[in-house]
Image: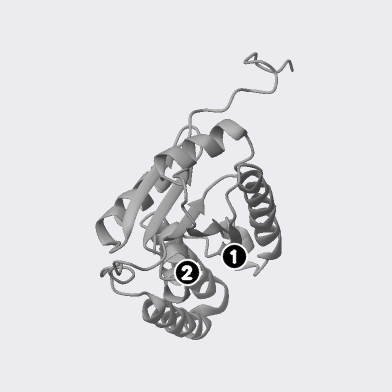
Amino acid sequence: MAPWKLPLVVAAIAVPIVAAFLVGGPGLGTAVGALAAVALLVVAARQSPRGPIGSEPTAGNRRTVLMAITCAIEEPAEVQAIAREAHLDQAGDDAEIVVLAPASIGFLDRWASDVEGARREAQTKLVATVAALAKAGIAAEGRVGDEDVVQAVEDQLQGFPASEVVLVSEGKTSDRVKAAAEELRSRLRADFHHVALPPRESSLGGHSPQS
């Protein structure tokens, strides 16, 4: 679980319990508290140990690359930058590439079990990115993953043992993505590259929109 989620989880557990005590008295408060304890145990059971991710690359096998993206890659210059940084433009390279788009699910959407919108948005990023890569002669497959970048990568590596993992982030990289990059760099057995794309120019030519 990402560190920023912990206070939200604590609040989500504590607030209903306090409200139940105030509204329904000790009986209802105890019942809600018991349900919260069960939920906490379920969440704790789902958390995996923070050990190494993936398996050691095997020499001589076909090169396999897992590219996790936090934004759609559409511009030729961006594709060239990624290809250059991740060495995807080498002559004769027949690497198998999978593009992974984590589904960015909002906190309220997760509580409401409304994840379809986030998955559609991730799918849209994948379509644009895979198409842009194809135009540059780079064939890739697209997959949607968990909202947590590290968890999404770990899940994919179970079925796709990549020899390299590339994280592509947009413009001004957020603290959340920086933390994910550091964790992947420290835990991955496969080679890791973090490609931070330059900030994108505004469609208004750099001028602030008029109100």
18, 116: nearer the viewer: 116
Residue type for callout 2: Gln
Determine whether, in the image, residue 76 is placed left or right of residue 89: right
Rendering quarter of residue 208: top right
* Residue 126 on image: x %, y %: 64, 54
Instruction: Measure the C-alpha gap from mark 1 to mark 2.
Output: 21 Å
Reading the image, the residue beneath label 1 is 110
Reading the image, the residue beneath label 2 is 156
210, 94: nearer the viewer: 94
Mark number, residue 146:
none
- Circle nearer the viewer, 1 or 2: 2
Q: Which residue is drawn at 40% across and 40% down?
A: 85
**Label 1 environment density (alpha carbons within 10 Å; few <14, some 14–19, many ≥20):** few
Q: Residue at x 45, y 58 (%)?
A: 65
- Is 141 above or below relative to 199? below
Q: Residue at x 64, y 44 (%)?
A: 132
